[in-house]
Image: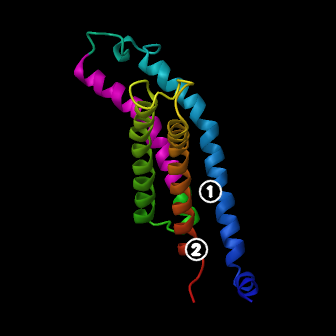
Amino acid sequence: MKKIKLLKNKKAQQIFVSMMVSIIILITLIIIVSPLKTETQKAINGSYSGNLSTSNTAISIPNKAAVIIIDLSLFYFVAILVACSIAYISGRNSFVGIITSIMMFMIVSALINPLKTLIVLGRDAAHLDCANATIGIGARLSCIFLDVWLFVFVVTCLFVAATYIFIKTVPKK
C-alpha cells in the first residue's frame, strides 16, 4: 500500500530523477578532474611560469601562496561538485544545504588521511609485522581487520549519507 501511495505522489520519480542528475554531476566531475589535475601539476612544477615552481628556492611569499591556492583548488572544486550533488539528492538546494554537504565531504576527506596513516603504522614491522609469514593467527586476523578498516569507514559514511538522504526525501506520515 505504501508503494502505491509513493508512486501516486510521484515521489519515487522525483527521487529517481534527482539521483540521475547527481550521477551526471559526478560523471562530469570524473571527466573534468584528470585534465584539471594535469594543468595544476604543470602550473606548480613551473611549466607555465618559473615564478610558481615549487622547486625554486627563491620563490617569493606571494608566489608560495599562489602555489598553495592552485594546489588546493582541485580539492575544493571536487568538494563543491560532490556537495552540490549531495544537496540536490537530499533536496536541500538552499545555500545552507550546500554548505552542510561541503562540510560533510571535507570532514570525511580529512578523516581518511589519518586513518590511512594509522593503518600503515599498525602494519609495519615494529607493530603487527603483517609482512612476516610466521606471525600467529590472531596477528593475521588483526592485519586483515586493519586492511578492511578504511573500506568500512568509507562504506559507513556512504550509508549514513544514504540514510540522511532517504530520511529527508521520503515523506513522513
Indicate the position of residue 99 as horizontal and vertical percent values: 40, 58
Asked whether the residues under the numbered discs 1 and 2 touch, taking CB atoms below 8 Å apart as contact, a structural biologist would say no
Q: 5 left or right of 120?
A: right
- At a point 42% along the width and 36% down the height, the residue shown is 73
| Separation of residues labelled 1 and 2 (CA atoms) | 14 Å
Task: Judge whether residue 19 is colored magenta.
Answer: no
Q: Which residue is mark 2?
A: 169
Q: Secondary structure at mark 1?
A: helix
Looking at numbered disc 1 in the image, what kind of residue is underneath it? Ser
Residue 160, placed above or below residue 23: below
Q: State which region is magenta.
A: 60-83
User: Which circle's residue, 1 or 2, is located before the other in the chain?
Assistant: 1
Indicate the position of residue 32 as horizontal and vertical percent values: 60, 37
Q: 113 left or right of 21?
A: left
Q: Which residue is mark 1?
A: 22
- What secondary structure is the stretch in magenta mostly built from? helix
Label 2: few (<14), some (14–19) or many (≥20) C-alpha neighbours in 10 Å: some
Q: Secondary structure at mark 2?
A: helix
Task: Judge whether residue 81 is colored magenta.
Answer: yes
Looking at numbered disc 2 in the image, what kind of residue is underneath it? Thr
Give the quadrant of residue 141.
top right
- At a point 55% along the width and 67% down the height, the residue shown is 163
Quadrant in the picture for the N terminus: bottom right
- At a point 72% along the width and 72% down the height, the residue shown is 13
Label 1: few (<14), some (14–19) or many (≥20) C-alpha neighbours in 10 Å: many
Indicate the position of residue 112 as horizontal and vertical percent values: 44, 42
- At a point 56% along the width and 53% down the height, the residue shown is 155
